[in-house]
Amino acid sequence: MSSTWNFIKRHKRKFIFTGVFVGGVYLLGKYAQRKIQEIQEREAAEYIAQARRQFHFDSNQRTCNMTVLSMLPTLREAIIHHLNSDSLTSLLKTKPANKLEIWEDLKIISFTRSIVAIYSTCMLVVLLRVQLNIIGGYLYLDNSVSKNGTTPLAPPDVQQQYLSSIQHLLGEGLIELITVVKKAVQEVLGPVSLKQCLSLQDLEQQLTHIRQVVEDNCASSKHKSLSWYMMPDEENTLASQACGLTENDVTTIKLLNETRDLLESPDFSTVLSTCLTRGFARFLDNMAEFFRPPQGDSIACSLPETSVLSPVSLPLAKIIPIINGQIHSICSEIPSHFVQDLLLIDQVKEFSANVYETFSTPHELQK
């Protein structure tokens, strides 16, 4: 024992150092183990939260698609109501003396309502994407973050008030859009004879010209952008709510202002422009089927052999009935190629995700 004690005294510092080292390693190991466990738990919680958020987002996009399809019949009926061609076609069957004048009116109405259908359907798709992803983001926060008894960000009454603003696109906005498009159609197609033969390429050029006139007129008018047709001016909204504002009214106006800011953003303009380009391209694809009549069809005009876009051209008078009926394909509640194309555009999906991400992130994290 004496020799052992002497050995310990001689190497006391070494034993102390070793003890401290071993103890430090043990404590450090325990600390590291606890930290690793905390990191794993935090990562697991973040993964679960992200998976829940992704599930909620995906569900919200399906709701967007179903809402668009459910509203298309209402949009179609509104367009047909304001641009009714049935009375003109009925008159033509009676072989009236002013037959040519009626055909000219039918030409303008037919092109106007198909072009308005393209514009308004594209607007409906992107506007509902914005509105439902804003609401979806707030609902995610209400269900996942704000569980401490605080006031919901989007109570049911606010949701109903906010989403009812879509009626502007189906009402006053649509009427104004019809006026602008009809004026452009008259300017571009008014001088074109009913007997003039148009190829599919000619038709594409005419539609491009009309679209340019519409959007140039919009840019130079008091409305400044296509967003006005989707949502009224802020001044009009505030004026109608000037007296007796409730807390829900204030929240609704806040949502409308946030939406208006998004509609006036460059990103939204890019997305809408992409949708319109795809919409007009799909419309021309639908029309192409009618430019391939059987051999010997008497309605086809001859084309030069150098034409490669379509084998035939048709007199404008033969194109008008085809154009007139396209609204049923464009504004179809049964998923058609036209609507599916719009719903599947990558830019629309990315923009929707960005909107949802912005409005489903707590303000503390945003800052």
Image: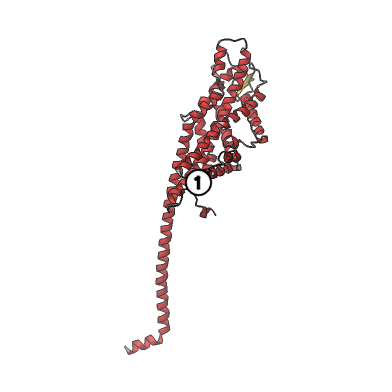
Asked if residue 315 shows in the view, the reply is: no
| Quadrant location of the N terminus in the rendered image | bottom left
With 281 as the anchor, is 2 left or right in this view?
left
Q: Nearer the viewer, residue 194 or 218?
A: 218
Q: Nearer the viewer, residue 57 or 96?
A: 96
Horizontal and vertical percent position of residue 144: 43, 50
Among all residues in the image, which is located at the extreme bottom?
2
- 257 lies above or below 122: below
Horizontal and vertical percent position of residue 362: 50, 52
Q: Residues within 10 Å of mark 1 (few under 14, many from 20)?
A: few
- 314 lies above or below 364: above
Please count the marks in the image. Answer: 1
Q: How is the image coloured?
A: secondary structure
Horizontal and vertical percent position of residue 350: 53, 43
User: Could you tell me which residue is drawn at 43 percent across and 56 percent down?
Assistant: 43
Residue 4 sits in quarter: bottom left
Q: Amino acid at mark 1?
A: Glu
Give the SS element for disc 1: helix
Q: Nearer the viewer, residue 217 or 114?
A: 217
Horizontal and vertical percent position of residue 13: 43, 83
Asked if residue 183 shows in the view, the reply is: yes
| Quadrant location of the C terminus in the rendered image | bottom right
Among all residues in the image, which is located at the extreme front?
244
User: Could you tell me which residue is drawn at 57 percent across and 31 percent down?
Assistant: 172
Which residue in the protein does label 1 denote?
247
- 270 lies above or below 91: below
- 223 lies above or below 313: below
User: Could you tell me which residue is drawn at 45 percent across and 42 percent down?
Assistant: 156
